[in-house]
Amino acid sequence: MGFGWQELLIILVIVALIFGTKKLRAIGSDLGGAVKGFKDSVSDAKEDGKRENQVISETTDAENQEKETEK
């Protein structure tokens, strides 16, 4: 049991009457900017994690090679 298109249309009209179209446009723009910023932050964090894992694996490989040469 969910909302049909008629219910959503009624809700949209009520929201437009309460806030006005200019305010809704500003809210939508602000929300879009926030979502874009969040996505950028998530992708940056993933890249940082990949770089960190690469550095760790390179360090581990170098340490393993040093141990093998000592033997």
Image: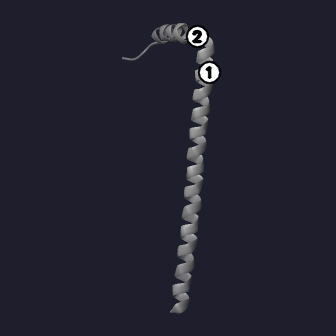
Q: Quadrant of residue 35?
A: top right
The spot of residue 16 in percent (x, y) is 55, 10
Look at mark 2 in the image and give the residue it sits on: 20
Q: Return the residue nearer the eye: 41 or 19.
A: 19
32 relative to 3 in the view: left or right: right
The spot of residue 71 in percent (x, y) is 50, 92
Quadrant location, the N terminus: top left
Q: Which residue occupies 58% across, 65% down?
A: 54
- Tell me which amino acid carries mark 2: Gly
Q: Which residue occupies 57% across, 58% down?
A: 50
**Extreme bottom residue here?**
71
Residue 26 is tagged as 1
8 relative to 34 in the view: left or right: left
- Tell me which amino acid carries mark 1: Ala
The spot of residue 28 in percent (x, y) is 59, 23
* 42 is higher (above) or lower (below) than 23: below
